Amino acid sequence: MLRIWHDHLSHARRRSPHTVRAYHATAARLLDALPEGQTWSSLARLEAPALRAQLAARRGEGIGNVSAARELSALKAFLAFARVQAGEPEARAPRMRGPRVKKGLPRPVTPDDAVNLAATVSEDAAEEWIAARDRAVLLLLYGAGLRIAEALSLPASVLPLGETLLVKGKGRRERIVPILPIVRDAVADYAVKVPYLLAKDELLFRGAKGGPLAQAMIQRAVARARVALGLPPTATPHALRHSFATHLLGAGADLRSLQELLGHASLSSTQIYTKVDAATLLDVYRSAHPRA
């Protein structure tokens, strides 16, 4: 049962590995809490009290509102899948409202801080090729709006970079992003200095021992650099992508174009950046206006 659910998420829905792991774990916890011998039909008949009991148990483990809301979404998705497997796709889903979660706005960094962050990370690197690698990764995040997972999954076959790059994002959706000269130069510099053979069927960015570069390595390097620069904890690798979007919007980019550049499935995901831009303007107003 869990294997079928896992395969559905991975292949039919094309969810990210992180989402697959989380949804699989949620389904496993639910099945562990229920009597043995569950079938798709018995799962399809579960009502809201069963979901409440499951969430109450998770609350007892100390999860907060955000995690509880995600848990409820995963439970509903699993039970909806169970109804389809049981041949009852029209059956009513349990009605249950999740906890309220206040959505925080992404906090972009300034263009100067983005460049300084990349420079400081490279200066702190132990080896010259690692410095070139880290700078190239961070400039891809800020200069092209890539997610860190997208940058680290690029194959070496993208070399040499041209004016555009084909990126495979969430849900295996493909998009084309423009590549600035400074980004092309940074990636080319890394490709020259990396001590490992960059075969076209292997990953572009390598770890210190030649294996795939882990996200944690970039995250830790950025954490050290932001302390050195006096930047807030919100200055993370992902903040560079937020900054890319916010700065483009502030310069006049329309939401539809921004949606394509970011690889968002829906426009609603992109519209948050209009709030980010307004928040930035408000910060400027408050700091500059004599009566603010």
Image (cartoon, rainbow, N blue to C red):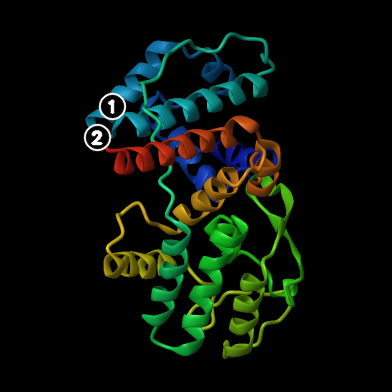
Q: Position of residue 134 (x, y in %)?
A: 49, 74
Q: Position of residue 38 (x, y in %)?
A: 50, 24
- Element type at mark 1: helix
Give the amino acid at mark 2: Glu
Q: Is residue 252 above or below residue 200?
A: above
Position of the C terminus, as image quadrant, is top left
Horizontal placement of 40 versus 230: left or right? right
Q: Which mark is residue 57?
A: 1
Q: Is residue 120 above or below residue 267?
A: below
Q: Position of residue 220 (x, y in %)?
A: 36, 67
For the residues marked 1 and 2, what is the alpha-carbon distance in whole angstroms?
7 Å
Q: How many marks?
A: 2
Q: Is residue 124 above or below residue 264?
A: below
Q: Quadrant of residue 211?
A: bottom right
CB contact under 8 Å: marks 1 and 2: yes
* Residue plotted at (65% across, 81% down): 188
* Residue plotted at (35% across, 41% down): 283
Nearest to the observer: residue 20 or residue 119: 119
Nearest to the observer: residue 274 or residue 175: 274
Q: Quadrant of residue 10?
A: top right
Give the amino acid at mark 1: Ala
* Residue plotted at (34% across, 24% down): 55
Return the residue at label 2: 61
* Residue plotted at (38% across, 12% down): 49
Nearest to the observer: residue 151 or residue 153: 151
Residue 105 seen by the camera: no
- Callout 2: few (<14), some (14-19), or many (20+) C-alpha neighbours within 10 Å? few
- Element type at mark 2: loop
Q: Position of residue 147 (x, y in %)?
A: 56, 55
Q: Quadrant of residue 184?
A: bottom right
